[in-house]
Image (cartoon, grey):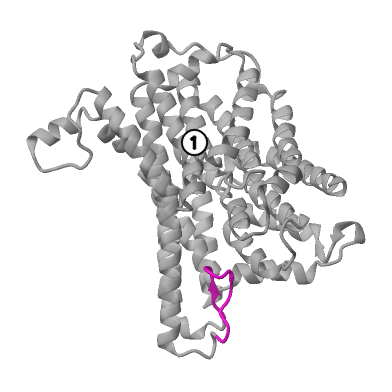
Amino acid sequence: MESIIIIVFVLGYLAITVEHSIKIDKLIPALVMMAISWALISLGIDSFSQWFDSSSHGLVEGFESLGHESKMHWMEETLLHHLGKTAEILVFLLGAMTIVEIIDYFDGFSTIKSFIKTKSKKKILWIFGFLAFFLSAIIDNLTATIVLISILQKLVSDRSVRIWYAGLIIIAANAGGAWSPIGDVTTTMLWIGKKVTTGHLFVYLFLPSLICMLIPFLIASFMKPFQGNLEQNIDDVEKPKSRFSSTMLYLGLGGIVSVPIFKTVTHLPPYVGMMLALGVVAIFAEIYSNSKFSISSHDSAESDAHAHHSPVHHSLSKIELPSILFFLGILMAVAALESLGILFGFAGTLQDTMPMLGTELHHEGVSDLVVLLLGVGSAVIDNVPLVAASLGMFSEPIDNELWHFIAYSAGTGGSMLIIGSAAGVVAMGMEKIDFFWYLKKISWLALIGFLAGAVAFMFTRTIF
């Protein structure tokens, strides 16, 4: 049964990668493989010899000897756990996307455009690169990608040029998220799991992460898509600027930046803070739009008329729902593999079969090559379950360099494929980027940056 579930996942994964060839939107195979995988688990629950408990990051003891009802209970609890964790991400995404759309409703991004005086493609590349790198460390790589691609859509009218920028923003955002405890979901996992501390994370990973971003950007700045100047966008000249544009920009971005602060103070999940930020931004949006305050719709002509003028309703109607459903499908499908202990076993097999590939690759019992392969694996599957597996596999103390290397590899390795990171998936949805276009044009740059940063980490750990 496990083999069949793996085959379903592989076929679904292939269908996602060739969506442009088979003319089927990627969210469809993602949802189908998620539903079939969990259905097969339910039907064959008695045949599984192990079960991975995500809440405790370890295998369930004596699972094979449990009765049918107990195994079904474990499955239902695990499914609910994963749905809860996935919903946290989706609600967070909805909040961030709505705030960005509200800012756009008031033409807030024109304020940022007015700051960017240059039309040089190369200079704009570096501006967005550093913005993505530092912004992702503050508000996380996923939200930073949403914000920057939204700005990019207003700045670069030619989509064939814009997707190049989007591809490199993914690399920069993932690199920036690796050295901050709130910059990436895997780094946050290690931080909450008391494996790394903020100070040591910065000391060990800032330079490797910076190199991981700088090398691809340096190479890209000499490539043809970033030569010359951007064309003047005619719409920008004619469109009058809203008098509330600057206020809504600072209010919206301030709301997003406040989310990690809210999380630190209250210890509540980030989506709660994002909903609070959305609520505050929505209040001001409704006041500024001079329309009656109403977020929830009612079956009345007055409410319907208001919906057409409400910035909140307008912004919610522009949310990329297919991207949200794709997230649901891919994360829950990966959760199915994780629950069966397949990913945990994959990480363990790496450690057992390649523990010693030369003393220069081996440090304190764990091969550097194993950690690098975890990074590559995070691009192919998902970094969250692989880091969850490493939490259960390795017993090194807090702030051991192994945990920092895992944080780097899992955080930046996902850039090598567009569906290897949350930032990549959301960019794919926002800009309709083709999987194979990214593979041919961007993946090699991400790989070079990933390896260069890894070498830099091996150097920095000998100093500190």
Residue 331, position in %: x, y? 48, 57
Q: Which residue is drawn at 23% across and 30% down?
A: 310
Image quadrant assignment for residue 386? bottom right
Q: Who's the residue at 48% across and 32% down the image?
A: 147
Can residue 20 be seen by looking at this rendering? Answer: yes
Q: Which span of residues is magenta-colored?
A: 50-62
Residue 245 position, x and y percent, is 38, 19
Q: Assess whether residue 56 is covered by the magenta stretch.
A: yes
- Above or below, comparing residue 224 to residue 278 in the picture: above
Give the camera-side residue of 188 and 440: 188
**Dominant SS in magenta:** loop
Q: Name the residue under label 1.
A: 257
Residue at 35%, 30% in the rendered image: 102
Total numbered labels placed on residues in the image: 1
Residue occupying the far front of the picture: 265
Q: Which amino acid does label 1 sit on?
A: Val
Q: Position of residue 340 (x, y in %)?
A: 54, 74
The residue lying furthest to the top in this view is: 237
- Residue found farthest to the left: 301
Query: Is residue 265 toward the left or the right of residue 214 in the image?
Result: left
330 in relation to 2, above or below? above
Residue neighbourhood size for the residue with mark 1, other residues' Cα within 10 Å, grouped as few (<14), some (14–19), many (≥20) = many
Q: Can residue 450 be seen in this view?
A: no
The vertical placement of 419 against 364, above or below, is: above
